Image (tube, rainbow, N blue to C red):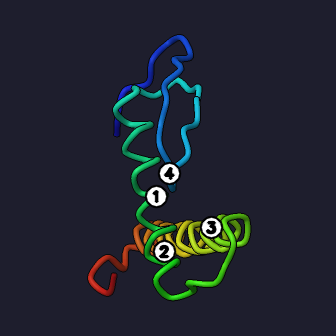
Amino acid sequence: MKERQREKQRTTVSIYGQQYTVAGYDSPEYMKEVAAEIDAKMRELRKVNPYLDTTRLAVLTAVNVMDDLKKLEEYIRYLEQQRLTGDEKNA
């Protein structure tokens, strides 16, 4: 896990051809990495849905990213439960 900065830093990122200034405690490199992943996801979805406007594409991207997050959270809970019950062999 990346070490967080003590003060918010601003950095400019590019997502789907648009420049955004984002602020956060993470390093500018990390924020650019996150933006690049969002950009890649939007471009991937655009290939499958070429007629979506940018707003709908962004919402669809957000839904997909949240779906991924929820599935990871569920898997983490499963692994934690396995660890607590001592059933790591079946994990």
Q: Residues within 10 Å of mark 1 (few under 14, many from 20)?
A: many
Is tag 2's residue or tag 1's residue first in the polypeptide sequence? Answer: 1
Provide residue 18's location: percent of width, then percent of height.
Answer: 55, 46
Q: Give the Cα distance between marks 2 and 1.
A: 25 Å
Q: Quadrant of the N terminus?
A: top left
Label 3: element kind = helix
> Is 58 rendered above or below residue 89?
above
Residue drawn at (59%, 74%), measured in percent from left and top?
64
Quadrant assignment, res 5: top left
Q: Which residue is mark 3?
A: 66
Dot 1 or dot 4, earlier in sequence:
4
What secondary structure is marked by label 1?
A: helix
Given the image, on which type of amino acid does mark 1 rest?
A: Asp
Q: Which mark is residue 75?
A: 2
Residue drawn at (38%, 36%) of the image: 30
CB atoms of marks 3 and 4 within 8 Å = no
Q: CA distance from mark 3 to mark 2?
A: 14 Å
Query: On the image, numbered disc 1 is attached to which residue?
Result: 39
- Eye-nearest disc, 1 or 4: 4
* Picture residue at 43% right of the left edge, 71% below the top: 79
Local SS, label 4: loop
Residue type at the position of mark 2: Tyr
Question: Of label 3 and label 2, which has the lower sequence position?
Answer: 3
Q: Which label sits on residue 17? A: 4
Mark 3 neighbour class, 10 Å CA radius: few under 14, some 14 to 19, many 20 or more: few
In x, y percent, where is residue 51? 63, 84
Q: Earlier in the sequence, mark 3 or mark 4?
A: 4
User: Mark 3 is on which residue type?
Assistant: Met
In the rendered image, which quarter contains the C terminus? bottom left
